[in-house]
Image: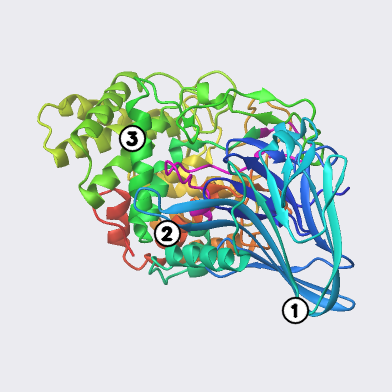
Amino acid sequence: MSTPPIDSYAFLSDTHTGALIGADGTVDWFCVPHFEGDAVFARLLDRRVGGAFTLSVDGHAEPARRYLPGTLVLESAHSVDGGTAIGQDFLAVRAGDAAQPFRAGMLLVRRLRVRQGSVRVRAEVTPRPGYGSGPVDWHRDDDQWVAGDAGLRLVSELPFRVDGPTVRAEAVLHEGQTVDVLLGYGPGRIEAVDPADLLEQTCRTWREWSDRSDYTGRGREQVRHSAAVLRGLSFDETGALLAAPTASLPEEIGGVRNWDYRFTWHRDAALLLLALFRLGHAEEGRRYLHFLLTTCAGAGDVLTPLVGIHGVTREEEVLEHLGGYAGSRPVRIGNEAAQQLQFDTYGHVLDAALSYQQLTGELSGAQWQALRRHVDTMAARWREPDHGVWEIRGPCRHYVNSKVMAWVCLDRGIRLAGLLGDDGAPVERWRTERDAIHAEVLDRGYDRGIDSFVLAYDSTELDASLLRMPLVGFLPGDDPRVLATIARVRRDLAVAPALIRRYVVDDGLPGEEGAFLLCSFELVSALVLAGQRDEAAEVFDRLCAYAGPLGLYAEQLDADGTALGNYPQAFTHLALIEAALNLDGSGDRDALHAWAERTARPVH
């Protein structure tokens, strides 16, 4: 069986878990009882044993697919000899309250309506819990099918029958007929529901949320869709943001760079907070910041770079029984990077906290006391080497980005102490250390021979994360050293027009990865702050053209446009939003620079 392109999959979400569904009508990835749970359908990572849920129309070519506007409801139009049919696939959701704005129905709903003529429909459900570890035994419970230990129930008017580990059905449907298949993953029986009502309720919930944003500027549709994707990746119970809903999708096809991204990375913090507030989703911003600060308050003196959506992190392990996406092994779940020392984390957290306080004035005294402890940690430890933002699995080094973000941590700490009137904070010591970092980075982090900031002290290697230097106010966007670094990164890290790698360095792993889309979109923002708006617009348009057929982005792209890495990737969609907003506001450069330095409210 051929392996579908990563970005050909649709992403469904009820904000409690997610599913990926291919163009062939097969759900190839589905984790229960939540995003971090074990996959009961994992054909994405092994097309032989992974398990899947298919609802297909006989004789169809690939259907025309789209998301219903403002939603994560997938619509598929099937045209075959003898008839046409329209399908809708979604994870049911309804509006909640301020404590939990979205309420998951814990139902994967698949509908198919015959618009004209007749079609033959086939359905197969083969759960294999534990990431394909083994089959289930099906049994009947009145009108519902129960899948052994998988925690799944199935309801449908289709004539399902048991065939070993699979339940399957087929039927001929005629014009005007609709068939529904409901797969429940919650506790207890599936309640009697009208699937048409579930569809209407789910669409209304998504659209009411999307319509809160009044953004009408550059890239409006991409921004709106990216915001919905981010909402779909935000866990309903805590507001935590997943980096992606998938595990072990390869950064190199057939290679070993396969990681689990079903965690919250603190480096997303400031970007997510600013995106939510700038697009009118303040409540979600508050929920996320509460999760972030609660996690940081319980972290002791060392912040881990990532945590699970419940505030704990699963240890990394290898699933030997899975062959991997397109033969990319090993298949890993959990993430060892949680054990790394990454000083950039502190800067992202304090940057988010300052932005939150500037926007709301709601930071509590207890929250500030926890943050103060982390500012003190950076004041004491910034001279140490660390593992760096890119989680290279090698020895610690003096990464320039880590130093810049340590500077951000101290700078934001100083500003927060002033905003909160904390006369007891050791602001003078923080200011001394902040200024020492700035001087050292300019002295040791910039190589005059190659005319660029570099990956680490005493190296000449490049690092695309340095494009963020003007975006956090470390230097003005039109500083000659920033301009030279932008030019060098575009020249030496490019894999195709508008596409740039993170770095080119021996990172201890065989093979190489593709272009990193976060950095590619951050190039747009850096060009805007550099005063190169036309160039920024050209890069932005090229990147928008690289979106998958459903407007989704993976973490990376090969030079030929092949999607790589986990999918859909929150960081990519966040950087798209940031780039669009900065590009749209490029007519007011003073305001843009003020916002980059966190001295003004965001530009709209």
- Tell me whether circle 2 and circle 3 mark residues in contact (CB < 8 Å): no
In the foreground, 488 or 544: 544
In the foreground, 252 or 403: 252
**Crowd class of label 1 (few under 14; some 14 to 19; many from 20; radius 10 Å):** few
Under mark 3, the amino acid is Leu
Task: Kindly report the distance in space between the C-alpha atoms of the residues bearing marks 2 and 3.
Answer: 31 Å
Where residue 229 appears, as percent x and y from the top left, is 53, 55
**Crowd class of label 2 (few under 14; some 14 to 19; many from 20; radius 10 Å):** many
Q: Which mark is residue 528?
A: 2
**Crowd class of label 3 (few under 14; some 14 to 19; many from 20; radius 10 Å):** many
Residue 50 in view, yes or no = no
Quarter of the picture holding the C terminus: bottom left
Residue 542 in view, yes or no = yes
Q: Is residue 242 magenta?
A: yes
Q: Which residues are magenta?
A: 229-258
Where residue 488 appears, as percent x and y from the top left, is 54, 45
Where residue 86 appears, as percent x and y from the top left, is 72, 72
In the foreground, 192 or 131: 192
As helix, strand or loop, the secondary structure at mark 3 comes to helix
As helix, strand or loop, the secondary structure at mark 2 comes to helix
Q: Which mark is residue 167?
A: none
Residue that numbered label 1 is attached to: 176
> Measured along the vertical axis of the image, is residue 245 above or below residue 530?
above
Task: Kindly report the distance in space between the C-alpha atoms of the residues bearing marks 1 and 2.
Answer: 53 Å
Determine the main secondary structure of the stretch shown in magenta.
loop
Where residue 155 appears, as percent x and y from the top left, is 70, 54
Task: Kindly report the distance in space between the C-alpha atoms of the residues bearing marks 3 and 1.
Answer: 53 Å
Can you tell which quarter of the image residue 395 is in?
top right
Under mark 2, the amino acid is Val
Sequence-first disc among 2 and 3: 3
Left or right for 180, reference 303 = right
Can you tell which quarter of the image residue 418 is in?
top left
